[in-house]
Amino acid sequence: MTNVSTPLQPIQTGLLKSIRYIKRSYNNPLKHGQDLRREYGDVVMQKAGKMRVVHLFGADAHSLCLLNRDKTFSNKKAWDMIIGRIFPNGLMLRDGDDHRYHRRLMQAGFKSKAMHGYLGQMIPQIRDEIASWPAQGTMMAYPTLKKLTLDLAATIFLGMDLGDDSRAINTAFETTVAASMPRIPFAIPGTLLWRGIKARQTMCNFFLPMIAQRRAGEGNDLFSLLCKAEDEEGRGYTDQEIVDHMIFLMMAAHDTTTSTLTSITYALARNPEWQERIAAELDVLDMQNPTTETMNGTIEKRLGYQRGLADVPAPFHFAKNEQPRIRIWRLSNSRGRIGHHLSDSYALHEGILGQSV
């Protein structure tokens, strides 16, 4: 990778080419990143108004940004610019001690006992949903899986059946996710961003009235556990912090899981032999009573998961912002999906389920 300590200058592009870059970054971010790297190298600076954007490509870039050993980069500053008006104060939008404190409190909902409890609730719900799928004909994978994951999120995170609220909450989630990267970054009435902010308020109004009851109750769903979570001094989340975390977790869990399952479904459909290998592995296991240990030991399934995500990972970029002492970057963007397509820096382990999809 190019030495990132060397002072950079923004690439020089004419008006028409700049417009093409902007359109392509929305319509085809993979090709956009690949073309930038091919034309300009592993470190590319672009100027957007007063902001300078630096794209970093390759394994070294992923290591630099994700490990962030010297705390060079800020998640909060970068993601606040992108999704902060829709998902403010989510765990990913926090840095340093603040992030660690909120993550430590949140562990109450992700301990081993809680995770085993979630699995026990998920299995019958998944079986019932799959049994309702048509045995023949055409079924659209993404909307079907999206409904399943939202229903699961309601069960696991909220401990409830959304019932009549399902359609309104699903619409609110879809609107907030779509509005997280609007092409028009102004909340003018009628714009996508404006609708996203209104949809967020719908979710706030849904969660806030339930907090007092969840704090006093004995529920083991994630919402209840976050309401009751306390540190060593007996301090917990504020009501607004609970709402912020729940909205972000619901979005992150069901949206990225839907994307992941859709990518894997596509990969398996393109490669029927992978289906046979995974099915053969599962046939010898006790899938009537699966456990986390059983699922973690399935080699072929895990390789299918990795292969499906190698070409289409759920997040297509990692956004980072400079800390004040770093002068060169205003925003560093290491594109995760593109990294999976760089043959010189991302080599699949030999024998992983054949060729690329």
Image (cartoon, rainbow, N blue to C red):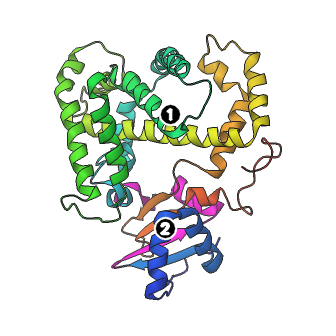
Label 2: element kind: helix
Q: Extreme front residue here?
A: 137
Q: Is residue 280 left or right of residue 317?
A: right
* Viewer-side label of 2, 1: 1
Q: Is residue 54 magenta-colored? A: yes
Magenta range: 49-77
Q: Nearer the viewer, residue 236 or 132?
A: 132
Residue tagged by mark 1?
A: 145
Q: Which mark is residue 25?
A: 2
Residue 5 image point, x, y percent = 54, 75
Q: Extreme right residue here?
A: 351
Visible residue check, residue 224: yes
Mark-to-mark CA distance, 2 and 1: 27 Å
Q: Nearer the viewer, residue 112 or 244?
A: 244
Label 1: element kind: helix
Q: Amino acid at mark 1?
A: Leu
- Taking 137 as reference, is 8 above or below it? below
